[in-house]
Image: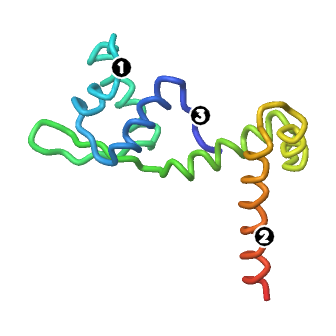
Amino acid sequence: RMNELTKAEEQIMQYVWKLDKAFLKDIVEQFPEPKPAYTTISTVVRVLVKKKFLNFETFGKIRQYSPAISKERYFSQHLKQVIGNFFNGSTSTFASFFAESDTLNLTEMEQMKAILEEKIKTLKANDE
């Protein structure tokens, strides 16, 4: 089971995923005004290293950070946890939730359907 990210940690990960490689000052620059304190960001970055979400290389006295996990992998595992926690692990219940809710319009549903159909085609072709 993957470590959960707090809102602050997830925000920093979003910036590092976007930048790919970043020094602390680069991460700080991503924040909108009013920016959190440098020390606050530095502390969260250290936690992300400890949780194995960030790797770093040292250049003299400064560290350059990079993601230890891809955004896709994090999202995929996070989604599995959401489905597990809120939909009793049932992907079909999860799908029904989207189908029944007003969060998606027709175009978005058609896009999802097209993506799923494409994936089903690929999986079937690989099975043969």
Furthest toward the bottom, the residue is: 128
Q: Give the side of residue 93 with respect to residue 78, left or right.
A: right
SS at mark 3 in the image: loop
- Up-down: is 127 above or below 104? below
Q: CA distance from mark 3 to mark 2?
A: 30 Å
Image coordinates of residue 53 in percent, x first then y, are: 45, 42
Residue under the image location 32 percent in, 28 percent down: 30
For discs 3 and 2, the disc positioned in front in the rendered view: 2
Q: What kind of residue is marked 3?
A: Glu
Residue at x 38%, y 43% (from the top left corner): 18
**33 vs 73, nearest the viewer:** 33
Q: Amino acid at mark 2?
A: Ile
- Neighbor class of circle 2 (other Cα within 10 Å; few <14, some 14-19, many 20+) is few
Res 59 → quadrant? top left
User: Which residue is at a point 56% across and 46% down the rendered structure image?
Assistant: 74
Q: Mark 1 = which residue?
A: 32
Q: As drawn, is 6 to the left or to the right of 89? A: left
What residue would you read off at disc 3?
4
Q: Which residue is mark 2?
A: 120
Quick one: label 1, few (<14), some, or many (20+) residues within 10 Å?
Answer: few
Query: Which quadrant of the rendered structure holds the C terminus?
Result: bottom right
Give the mark nearest the N terminus, 2 or 1.
Answer: 1
Name the N-terminal-most of marks 3 and 1: 3
With respect to residue 99, does 5 lie above or below?
Answer: above
For the point 75% across and 61% down, which residue is it? 114
Type of the residue with mark 1:
Pro
For label 2, the SS is: helix
Per the model, the C-alpha gap separating discs 2 and 1 is 41 Å
Please say if 75 is above or below 117.
above
**Circle 2/circle 1 CB separation < 8 Å:** no
Task: Choose between 59 and 70: the one closer to the eye.
Answer: 70
